[in-house]
Amino acid sequence: MIVVEQVFNIADLPEEARSYARDTLTLGWEDRTHARGRRRTDGGVEFATSLPRGTVLRAGDCFVLDHPPLVVTVVEQPEPVFVIQPRAPAEWALYAYHIGNRHQPLMITGDALVCPDLPGVEQLLEQHRMPYVRQLQAFTPAVLVAGHSH
């Protein structure tokens, strides 16, 4: 099985790989945090990754496979999320604090806080009267903390 050890930006592909066939690899946010493991492209090609610890894959990241000659581009899978739109600057901090205090992952966009639609999160949002809607969208947390404990 081919083992890939490097991630490329599409603009920085090696010259020889620019003519390779293309495929995609659609992954949810948790799967994009796994640096090592078996993968299967959307077209069915199997390979493995052995990336540096802490690597988080993002949309547009690429893997180069030599056999078969293939460039595999990461696609972020839309997932069920809560989209919270704070109405005032103080709400941004307060809502982020409450979500983080419950050890929930959080994505910060230009106009919203986004967290996965996980059990118990809706109760948290309602308890603190946070305005939210449910949506399907790609999710990448602002910070991933490994080995956190109290």
Image (cartoon, rainbow, N blue to C red):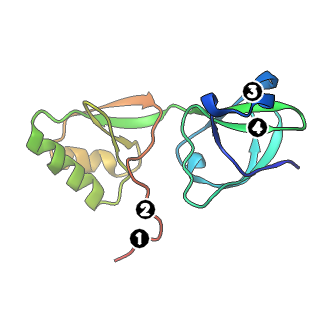
Occupied quadrant, residue 122: top left
Query: Spatial distance from mark 1 to mark 4, Cα to Cα?
Result: 33 Å
Q: Is residue 4 left or right of residue 93?
A: right
Q: Nearer the viewer, residue 102 or 52?
A: 52
Residue at (72%, 33%) from the top-left corner? 72
Q: Is residue 142 visible?
A: yes
Q: What's the mark number on residue 148?
A: 1
Residue at (22%, 55%) from the top-left corner? 98
Determine crowd level at label 4: few under 14, some 14-19, many 20+ residues with C-alpha closer than 10 A. many
Q: Is residue 108 above or below residue 149?
A: above
Could you tell which of marks 2 and 4 lies nearer the N-terminus?
Answer: 4
The mark closer to the camera, 2 or 4, is 4
Determine crowd level at label 3: few under 14, some 14-19, many 20+ residues with C-alpha closer than 10 A. some
Q: Is residue 60 above or below residue 113?
A: above
Q: Which residue is mark 4?
A: 64
Q: What's the mark number on residue 145?
A: 2
Determine crowd level at label 2: few under 14, some 14-19, many 20+ residues with C-alpha closer than 10 A. few
Identified by mark 4, the residue type is Val
Label 2 residue SS: loop
* Cβ atoms at labels 1 and 4 below 8 Å apart: no
Q: Residue furthest bottom?
A: 150
Determine crowd level at label 1: few under 14, some 14-19, many 20+ residues with C-alpha closer than 10 A. few
Query: Spatial distance from mark 2 to mark 1, Cα to Cα?
Result: 6 Å
Residue 105 drawn at (x, y percent): 38, 51
Identified by mark 2, the residue type is Val
The mark closer to the camera, 1 or 4, is 4
Q: Is residue 140 left or right of residue 48?
A: left
Label 1 residue SS: loop
Label 4 residue SS: strand
